[in-house]
Image (cartoon, helix red, strand yellow):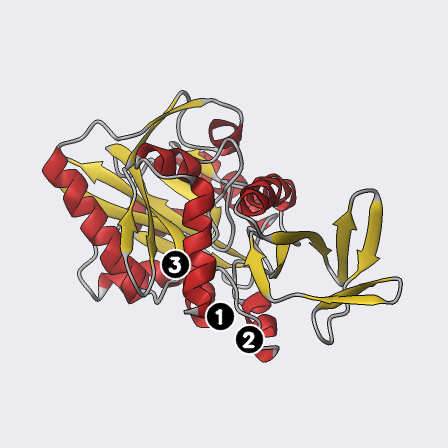
C-alpha cells in the first residue's frame, strides 16, 4: 500500500504539521507501510524522497520517478489549518475516491469553525462558555462585548490552531489590540468568556470494531494559558493521566465520545475541556491533532498501554474495512 503523508498547508501551523508528519512517517514505516512525504504550500504539492523532490500530479494523485508512476492508495492527512483541517483537502480526496485518515469535509468544516461548533453543540446540552463572533466587516462595541462575555476573556482567530493570534485579556483597554492581533490570522474573531478551572483533554478513536478513549491529560500552563510556547516549548506541565476524580474522568470520556458522534468525526480526535467543580465545559475539538514529539496524543496512547504505530494501523485498516 502506497500511503501519502500530507503535511504543510497554508496556515501559521505549517512547521508544526511538518513535525507531526515526520513522526507519522516513522510510525507507519515501522508498521510496515510504504510512505511518501508530501509538502503542500498553495498550489505546490511536492513529494520529498531523500534529497530528491517530485511534483504531485493532482489529476490522479500520483507522482512519477523516471518512467515509473506511483499512485497513492491512501492519504494520511496531518495538515493543521487550511486546507487539511477545514475540509478542502477532504473534498479533493473524495472526488478521487482516495480513503483518508480523518473526518470528512462537512465534519471538518464544522469543527474548524470554533463559534459554529459551540452554537451547534449547545442545542444538544453541551456546556460551553459564552462567546461573541466578529468579522472584519462588522463593527463592534467594546462595552457590549464585556457585558456579554465579561473579563477576563480570550480573543482568538475563529478558524485556527496552536494558539496563534490568541490573547487572554484582563482589561477593557486591551480588547482592540487583541482583536487586531487575531485578525492578522483570520477574517473572523471569536471572543470567549474565561472559565476558571482545570484544563483537560481527551483523545479518542472510533472504528467499526471498537472505541478507544485514551487516558485524559491535565494541562497546567506555567504562564496565563496554554499558548504556543506552552504547547511546543515545554512551558506547561502535561500530566497523563489527569489528576481528577475517576468518575469525572469517565464522564469526560463519555462526553468526548458523544461530541465525536454529534460532529460526525472519524479517525483520531482530541476534545478539550475545562473542569470547573464537577462541571465540564467544552472548549474545542481538534480533528487533526498534533502528533509531533511534543504533542499530547502520543503520550495518551502510550499511557493506555498501546503502541502508536498499532493505533495508526487501526485507522488505515478501518478505512478499507
Marks 2/3: CA–CA distance: 26 Å
- Residue with the most extreme front position: 32
Query: Between marks 1 and 3, how big is the CA–CA gap?
Result: 17 Å
* Residue 228 shown left or right of residue 63 in the figure: left
In-front residue for pair 311/111: 311
| Left or right, residue 184 beside residue 175 | right
Q: Residue furthest right?
A: 66
Say which label, 2 or 3, has the lower sequence index. 2
Residue 274 picture quarter? top left
Q: Residue at x 56, y 49 (%)?
A: 32
In primary-sequence order, the first of circles 1 and 3 is: 1
Q: Position of residue 61 (x, y in %)?
A: 70, 69
What number is the disc on residue 105? 1
Q: Earlier in the sequence, mark 2 or mark 1?
A: 2
Which residue in the protein does label 3 denote? 115
Quadrant of the drawing holding the N terminus: bottom right
Check contact, mark 2 vs mark 3: CB within 8 A: no
**Residue hosting label 2:** 94
Q: Position of residue 84 (x, y in %)?
A: 57, 59
Amino acid at each position: 500500500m502506497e500511503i501519502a503523508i500530507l503535511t504543510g498547508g497554508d496556515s501559521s501551523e505549517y512547521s508544526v504539521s511538518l513535525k507531526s508528519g515526520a513522526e507519522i512517517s516513522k510510525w507507519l514505516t515501522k508498521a510496515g507501510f510504504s510512505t511518501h512525504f508530501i509538502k503542500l504550500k498553495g498550489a505546490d504539492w511536492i513529494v520529498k524522497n531523500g534529497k530528491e523532490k517530485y511534483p504531485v500530479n493532482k489529476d490522479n494523485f500520483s507522482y512519477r520517478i523516471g518512467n515509473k508512476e506511483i499512485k497513492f492508495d491512501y492519504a494520511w492527512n496531518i495538515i493543521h489549518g487550511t486546507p487539511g483541517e477545514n475540509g478542502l483537502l477532504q473534498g479533493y480526496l473524495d472526488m478521487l475516491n482516495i480513503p483518508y485518515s480523518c473526518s470528512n469535509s462537512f465534519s471538518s468544516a464544522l469543527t474548524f469553525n470554533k463559534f459554529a461548533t459551540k452554537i451547534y453543540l449547545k442545542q444538544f446540552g453541551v456546556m460551553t462558555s459564552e462567546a461573541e463572533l466578529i468579522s472584519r466587516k462588522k463593527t463592534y462595541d467594546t462595552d457590549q462585548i464585556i457585558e456579554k462575555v465579561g473579563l477576563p476573556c480570550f480573543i482568538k482567530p475563529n478558524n485556527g490552531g496552536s494558539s496563534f493570534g490568541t490573547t487572554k485579556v484582563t482589561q477593557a483597554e486591551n480588547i482592540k489590540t487583541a482583536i487586531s492581533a487575531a485578525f492578522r490570522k483570520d477574517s473572523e474573531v471569536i471572543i470567549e468568556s474565561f472559565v476558571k478551572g482545570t484544563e483537560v483533554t481527551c483523545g479518542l478513536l472510533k472504528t467499526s470494531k471498537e472505541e478507544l478513549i485514551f487516558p485524559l491529560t491535565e494541562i497546567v500552563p506555567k504562564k496565563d494559558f496554554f499558548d504556543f510556547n506552552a504547547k511546543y516549548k515545554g512551558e506547561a506541565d502535561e500530566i497523563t493521566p489527569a489528576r481528577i476524580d475517576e468518575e469525572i474522568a469517565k464522564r469526560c470520556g463519555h462526553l468526548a465520545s458523544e461530541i465525536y458522534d454529534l460532529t460526525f468525526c472519524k479517525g483520531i480526535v482530541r476534545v478539550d475541556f475545562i473542569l470547573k467543580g464537577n462541571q465540564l465545559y467544552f472548549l474545542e475539538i481538534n480533528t487533526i491533532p498534533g502528533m509531533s514529539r511534543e504533542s499530547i496524543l502520543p503520550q495518551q496512547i502510550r499511557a493506555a498501554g498501546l503502541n502508536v504505530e498499532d493505533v495508526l494501523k487501526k485507522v488505515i485498516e478501518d478505512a478499507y474495512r
